[in-house]
Amino acid sequence: MNRQNLFAHAKEHFGTIPDYPWIKFPDYAVLRHCKNRKWYGLLMNVSGIKLGLKSEDRIDILNVKVDPEYSYFLQQKPDIFPAYHMNREHWVSVLLNGNVSDDEIYLLLQQSFDLTG
């Protein structure tokens, strides 16, 4: 999964385009509902160390909101972590490194969209 595919999916399925609200972090993109402006996705490029990885390489992650009862089970999967910089009970961070399938990312994005609507 890459940024372009993720943004194309968000536009096609949810009618949204990324918002870049921070001058200090120009690569950070927020996906918001058109009507209520609530976030349903946050795409960031962070150091692996921020997620507890051993690498300082910067990696793309997608934060999505999840049902708290499902959050724990998601975090048992490789490349899905407690959310970086968000409420860790309600949000998870998904590495966009190709190990989590596009279908699973799209499903998580849909669930996040529904939960924040």
Image: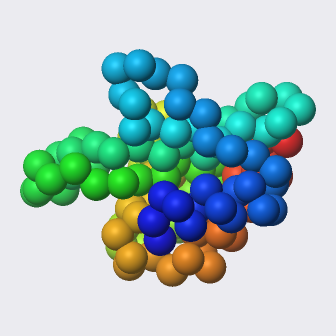
Q: Residue at x 65, y 53 (%)?
A: 66
The answer to whether residue 58 is left or right of residue 3 is left
Residue in front for this viewpoint, 18 or 102:
18
Q: In the image as oriented, which residue stretches furthest toward the right?
A: 35
Q: How many marks?
A: 0
Image coords of residue 38 (percent x, y): 74, 31
Say which of 25 and 93 sits in front: 25
In the foreground, 26 or 108: 26
Image coordinates of residue 28 in percent, x first then y, are: 44, 37
Q: Vertically, is 51 above or below 86?
A: below
Up/down of 63 relative to 29, above or below: below
Residue 49 lies, with reference to residue 11, above or below; the image says above
Is 50 left, or right, of 95 in this rendering? left
Residue 13 position, x and y percent, is 80, 62
Residue 108's image quarter? bottom right
Quadrant placement of the C terminus: top right
Work out whether residue 41 or residue 19 is closer to the camera in this orientation and state it.
19
Residue 58 image offset from top left, x and y in percent: 22, 50
Q: Residue at x 47, y 71 (%)?
A: 1
- Look at the image and tell me whether residue 35 can be seen: yes
